[in-house]
Image: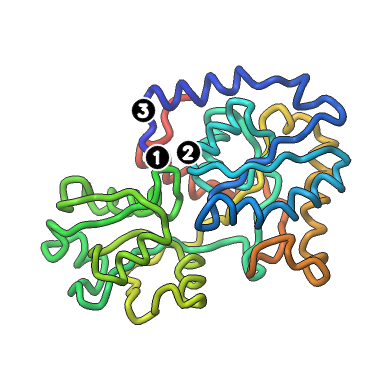
Amino acid sequence: MNLTRRHAASLALGSLLSLPSLALAQGAPLKFGVGMFQPDREKNDATYRPLAAHLAQRLGRPVELRTVDSWEGLAKSLANGETDLALMGPWGYVLANHFAEAQVVSTILYQGKPEYFAMIVTHPDSGLNSIDDLLGPKGRGRNFAFGDKGSTSGYLIPVHEFQKRGIDPEKHFARVLYTKHQAIQTQVTAGQLDAGADFNRNRNVMIAQGLITAARSKVIWQSAPLPNDAFAVSAVLAKDVAFVKRLQAALAEIGPLLASQPTLLPANYTGFVARDNAFYKPIRDAGLATGKLGAR
């Protein structure tokens, strides 16, 4: 995310607008925001309703689920009191923590692992065989797609990699797009885009579902391991230590429950593990290095 002063002010102001008495009131509904992990809002809501119902039962409070279209929007909603709990991408979490003191309580597991990888993909007819090709003369004047500016793997991490190599994508490429991860893979494999940023989980699922073919999605760069999506709470709720412990316990139960209740999480997600803010240091470091995290 290219945080302007207006964005920063919006997030900072949001932290002042949260209502502690409402968020902490016994029995008050908890507003649970979820990023757009699925292709559309209806499917996303349906996918995460079982998780919301589980949390409501274990916490003894109504949980109101809503899908937020962008990672940037979810970070802002957690900051300004529209959301109490959030399942969000790592970069969105770091933004909400930096500007509004939201706190991670757990990290989601994918096939038993709390980490994943960013990547850059092209198609086999592009003539690009490495990131050096992409960022060198062969890649100059091509078109390139990022995810939305609140995306970790789709924006922050590849931008950081480009910066380390002295490349400004807006100047190097003829056209830079910002779109959804699935659209990036679909358009790259169709030859409509020369290259784009994605993450391994999305690519693997799209291949498994037959949405793209592995032969048409050529990986030319992969990042170091990155922390998975964060389950975070607002700054207000983070101060309620007893509540945080109950929430972590409710999340920790999900892994064992999946054998009998497989709809609690989407396919390949296998539970949650307790993690704190330090786990997201690689994302924070990238944000600081790229200048995307400014003064609070």
Residue that appears at 75% across and 29% down: 239
- Judge the density around disc 1: few (<14), some (14-19), many (≥20) Cα neighbours within 10 Å: many
Per the model, the C-alpha gap separating discs 2 and 1 is: 7 Å
Question: Which residue is at the front of the view, 289 or 45?
Answer: 45
Residue that appears at 66% across and 47% down: 231
User: Residue 21 placed where, x, y %?
Assistant: 78, 19
Number of numbered discs overlaid on the protein picture: 3
Res. 287 in view: yes
Q: Secondary structure at mark 2?
A: helix
Decide which of tag 2 and tag 3 comes sooner along the chain.
3
Res. 277 in view: no
The residue wearing badge 3 is 4
Per the model, the C-alpha gap separating discs 1 and 3 is: 9 Å
Residues under numbered marks 1 and 3 in contact, where contact means CB atoms less than 8 Å apart: no
Residue that appears at 32% across and 74% down: 218
Mark 2 or 3: the one toward you:
2
Q: Secondary structure at mark 3?
A: loop
Residue farthest to the front? 42
Question: Which residue is at the front of the view, 159 or 258?
Answer: 258
Circle 1: residue type: Met
Circle 3: residue type: Thr
User: Residue 38 placed where, x, y %?
Assistant: 54, 57
User: Residue 9 placed where, x, y %?
Assistant: 46, 21
Name the quadrant of the N terminus.
top left
Decide which of tag 2 and tag 1 comes sooner along the chain.
1
The residue wearing badge 2 is 72
User: Residue 41 placed where, x, y %?
Assistant: 55, 50
Question: Which residue is at the front of the view, 196 or 193?
Answer: 193
Residues under numbered marks 2 and 1 in contact, where contact means CB atoms less than 8 Å apart: yes
The residue wearing badge 1 is 1
Mark 2 or 1: the one toward you:
2
